[in-house]
Image (tube, grey):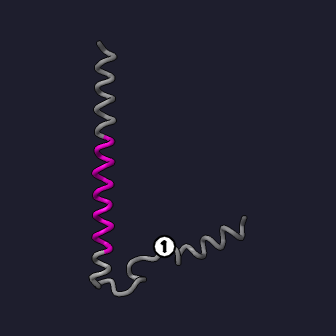
Amino acid sequence: MHKLLTILFSLSGMLFPCAVCYGDPESPMTHGMNMGVLTLLGFITFILSIVAFSIITISKREKKLNNL
């Protein structure tokens, strides 16, 4: 188990490289990749906020019904 963890931690640098490791950080491909990541984060944030708002709304309605 110890050897497996050592190998995984030593290879983690190769598994998760940053955009700079792919080449020029000012290239259009790097900017496109960064904008794609930000777009996906925006979509995920929007969807999760809708889910949270729905849960809060349902919770408030449930409390109101229980008080009647």
Rendered image quadrant of residue 59? top left
Asked whether 18 or 29 is in front, the reply is: 29
Q: Residue 39 placed where, x, y %?
A: 28, 63
In this rendering, position of residue 6 left or right of residue 40 = right
Asked whether 47 or 6 is in front, the reply is: 47
Q: What stretch is highlighted in magenta?
A: 33-52
Which residue type carries mark 1?
Phe
Rendered image quadrant of residue 27? bottom left
Residue drawn at x 32%, y 74% is 33
| Dominant secondary structure (helix, strand or loop) of the stretch shown in magenta | helix
Q: Residue 36 placed where, x, y %?
A: 30, 69
Q: Residue furthest bottom?
A: 24
Task: Name the quarter where the C terminus is drawn.
Answer: top left
With respect to residue 30, does 45 lie above or below? Answer: above
Residue drawn at x 38%, y 86% is 23
Q: Mark 1 points at which residue?
A: 16
Residue 48 located within the stretch drawn in magenta: yes
Q: Residue 24 placed where, x, y %?
A: 34, 87
> SS for tag 1?
loop
Q: How many labels does the image show?
A: 1
Q: Residue 47 placed where, x, y %?
A: 30, 49
In this rendering, position of residue 40 left or right of residue 22 = left
Task: Name the quarter where the N terminus is drawn.
Answer: bottom right
Residue drawn at x 48%, y 73% is 16
Residue drawn at x 41%, y 83% is 22
Dot 1 alpha-carbon crowd within 10 angstroms: few under 14, some 14 to 19, many 20 or more: few
